[in-house]
């Protein structure tokens, strides 16, 4: 392993064992989930969690999502009401995070919750994260594995480019499937849109979109997921110095989905932003994406990325 680069290991039994050993030793490891790559540490270990914040340059008032294997493990950390149980039964394992009252004596580091009396929990579906949870025996705090406010990583090479040697080990299991971060729900309020859409949630509970006046869950900062270059939205053509990311009938230097498929667009979003940021053009433009279904999550990320 070079002093400048992390070790990247393909997913497999030996790689998971090495990652679990690093977690048990108080280290941090990058690991794929079905949404984006996460930067994982034992959520009970304050020093390990502090390494996540240090590696990302993340504000300490911004809480972290804790990943666990199943509902039983989640109930050891949080208080569930009937609504939360219904959502967990329908969408776990999967890309849904629930913000719940912290269980007394949960043992989670206060840095994880940013000192709040709630905790953000998710049961992931991705084989690599589930294998790491099982092998490490720990609840894993795992925000996206990128520098704070930078573009989220959907491939191992994105993690390496963003964090470098500050993350010693990356589990590589290819590109992530969903491509945008999990939906976050507190009670019956959607705090952050994601792959589990409002329509899907409303088939279970009468949820509403909303936000709180303070940061109560991950991904609520106004400026987030940002490339280095200025970003223009709702573009139907590129200006001279722009790299255009197309969608549907709007062709560009790259496209989120030529077929106008929002699910494909979500999976390609951050990958396309990484390519645009690496291009020779000074600015980035993105074609309109309809504000429906997972398109709501795509536009949420794009609006935050455009804040400078």
Image (spheres, grey):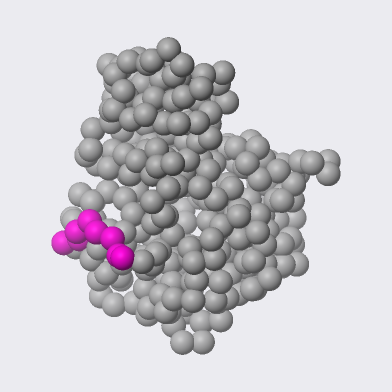
Q: Is residue 106 magenta?
A: no
The residue sitting at 38% across, 51% down in the picture is 222
Name the spot of residue 7 as percent of width and height, x first: 75, 44
Q: Is residue 218 left or right of residue 169?
A: left
Name the spot of residue 150 as percent of width and height, x first: 53, 43
- Quadrant of the frame with the N terminus: top right
The residue sitting at 20% across, 60% down in the picture is 207
Relative to 13, say whether 207 is above or below.
below
Residue range of the region highlighted in magenta in the rendering: 206-213
Counting every numbered tag in the picture gives 0
> Residue 107 versus residue 229: which sits nearer the camera?
229
Relative to 83, say whether 298 is above or below.
above
Q: Quadrant of residue 102?
A: bottom left
Name the spot of residue 138 as percent of width and height, x first: 61, 69
The residue sitting at 45% across, 47% down in the picture is 224
Residue sitting at the far right: 2
Q: Is residue 14 left or right of residue 223?
A: right
Name the spot of residue 269 as percent of width and height, x first: 43, 33
The residue sitting at 44% across, 82% down in the picture is 103
Residue 224 visible in this rendered orientation of the protein: yes
> Residue 39 versus residue 178: which sits nearer the camera?
39
């Amino acid at each position: 392993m070079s002093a400048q680069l992390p070790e990247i290991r393909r997913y497999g039994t030996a790689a998971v064992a090495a990652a679990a050993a690093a977690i048990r030793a108080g280290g941090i490891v990058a690991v794929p989930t079905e949404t984006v790559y996460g930067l994982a540490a034992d959520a009970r270990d304050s020093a390990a969690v502090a390494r996540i914040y240090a590696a990302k340059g993340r504000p300490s008032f911004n809480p972290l999502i804790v990943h666990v294997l199943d509902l039983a493990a989640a109930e050891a950390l949080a208080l569930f009401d009937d609504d939360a149980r219904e959502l967990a039964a329908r969408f776990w394992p999967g890309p849904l995070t629930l913000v719940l009252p912290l269980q007394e004596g949960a043992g989670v580091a206060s840095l994880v919750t940013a000192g709040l009396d709630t905790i953000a929990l998710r049961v992931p579906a991705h084989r690599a994260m589930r294998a790491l949870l099982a092998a490490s025996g720990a609840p894993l705090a795992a925000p996206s594995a990128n520098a704070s406010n930078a573009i989220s990583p959907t491939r191992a090479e994105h993690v390496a480019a963003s964090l470098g040697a500050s993350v010693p080990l990356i589990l590589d299991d290819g590109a992530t499937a969903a491509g945008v971060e999990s939906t976050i729900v507190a009670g019956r309020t959607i705090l952050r849109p994601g792959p589990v859409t409002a329509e899907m949630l409303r088939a279970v509970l009468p949820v509403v979109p909303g936000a709180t006046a303070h940061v109560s869950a991950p991904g609520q900062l106004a400026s987030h997921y940002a490339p280095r270059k200025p970003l223009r939205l709702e573009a139907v053509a590129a200006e001279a110095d722009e790299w255009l990311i197309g969608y549907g009938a709007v062709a560009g230097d790259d496209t989120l989905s030529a077929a106008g498929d929002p699910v494909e667009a979500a999976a390609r979003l951050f990958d396309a932003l990484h390519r645009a940021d690496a291009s020779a053009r000074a600015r980035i433009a993105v074609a309109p994406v309809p504000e429906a279904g997972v398109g709501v999550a795509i536009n949420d990320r794009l609006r935050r990325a455009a804040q400078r």
